[in-house]
Amino acid sequence: MNLLVADIGGTNARFGFQKNVTSEIKYINYLKCKDYTNIDDALDFYINSNKLKIDNMVLAVAGPCGNNIVKLTNNNWKFNKIELSKKFKVKSFLAVNDFVAQAISFTDFFISKKTNYSKEFLNQFNLKLIKKGNTLKNSNLLVTGPGTGLGVCTLTSFNNCLIPIEGEGGNVNFSPQNKIEIELLEFLLKEKNYVSFEDLVSGRGLQNIYKFKNIKNDQVYKKIDASQIGELALNNNAIAKESVKLMFSILGTFISNNILINGCQKGVIIAGGIINKLDTLLDQSDFFYNLINKGAYKKYVDNVPIFFSHDENNGLKGSAKCFNNKYFTKYGTIYNI
């Protein structure tokens, strides 16, 4: 098998190696995308530094992967699937959206028939239940979360085949729900003619909200990284904390929209780097209020359980599972060289 797996976002690239289908993923390395001109250089460095023999490759990347030319959404890397697979002389090659890999990593969770989740069961998947609900076991599962961008994927099944429904849902129009969100939208429309949910629920989204909050409160604004805003928020800086809380409130709206659009009554798993660092502030936001503020469909959404994922290597695990998933192996999205 000798499978190289990767989880590549806008900021970081994670790589791992799986010897065979039953073995653990080893040689896990984290690289900064900005340190490498292109994906070829990053792959070369990883393979050579770990002295690996690679026969197969699965890359989970932040962006659409339907065409032969793949361009990452929040990163200047792009690659040609066929040329890249030939360069590294692999027998088979697959590129998937990073949140497809995230979703597929929860294969065993999805196919389980459990509707009551014990802590021991959830620990197997590094999941934490943050909102109870009544799981519909034959329904769809939503996997989403903010990082450099805002990823989303719905997991469903047909004829015993697990199917990830991918898309770029983070880039749909932002829909404000109250006065402060309307003000935020008007603020951003002065700078751009289209505002998506990703412009508010992501690393750059947090930066946008922080800028808005500073100017609204007549403070001197200085641009800082999202990670710095997060640190300030955790240290009780008022504007940074309010910025994080507003971002989480908007995330609640985004998630409930996706629950309704895709019928995700099995549950919602929130992943992504931002959640892992700032989840302690979620309860202080209007996340749960916005989540169920759906008029006649309040009860529908309120019945859906919600989980946090705290496993930073889910993208790698999901990439490995994609390699053996019937949806990819049977229906022709793997390049056999």
Image (cartoon, helix red, strand yellow):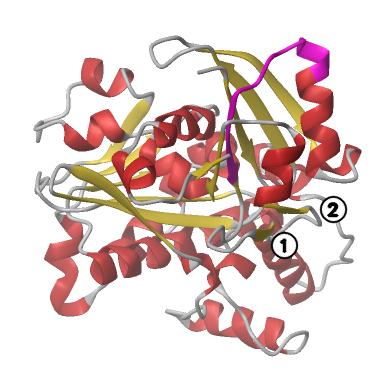
Q: Is residue 55 magenta?
A: yes
Residue denoted by label 2: 224
Looking at the picture, does residue 35 appear above or below residue 331? above
Q: Quadrant of the C terminus?
A: top right
Q: Nearer the viewer, residue 219 or 195?
A: 195
Q: CA distance from mark 2 to mark 1?
A: 9 Å
In the figure, is residue 299 to the left or right of 83? left
| Quarter residue 15 falls in | top right
On residue 259, which mark appears?
none
Looking at the picture, does residue 220 appear above or below residue 127? below
| Quarter residue 261 falls in | bottom left
Q: Nearer the viewer, residue 273 or 156?
A: 156
Contact check, label 2 and label 1, Cβ < 8 Å: yes
Residue denoted by label 1: 210
Q: Nearer the viewer, residue 272 or 25?
A: 25
Q: Position of residue 200 (x, y in %)?
A: 60, 66
Residue 241 visible from this viewpoint: yes
Q: Position of residue 277 (x, y in %)?
A: 59, 35
| Quarter residue 38 falls in | top right
Mark 1 is surrounded, within 10 Å at the Cα level, by few (under 14), some (14 to 19) or many (20 or more) other residues, namely many
* Kind of element beneath mark 2: loop
Looking at the picture, does residue 266 appear above or below residue 201? above
Q: Amino acid at mark 2?
A: Ile
Pick out the residue farthest to the front: 337
Q: In terms of sequence position, does the residue under pointer 2 or pointer 1 come before the other?
A: 1
Residue at image position (61%, 82%) is 185
In the figure, is residue 34 to the left or right of 314? right
Residue 231 visible from this viewpoint: no
* Kind of element beneath mark 1: helix
Magenta stretch bounds: 48-60
Looking at the picture, does residue 294 appear above or below residue 81? below
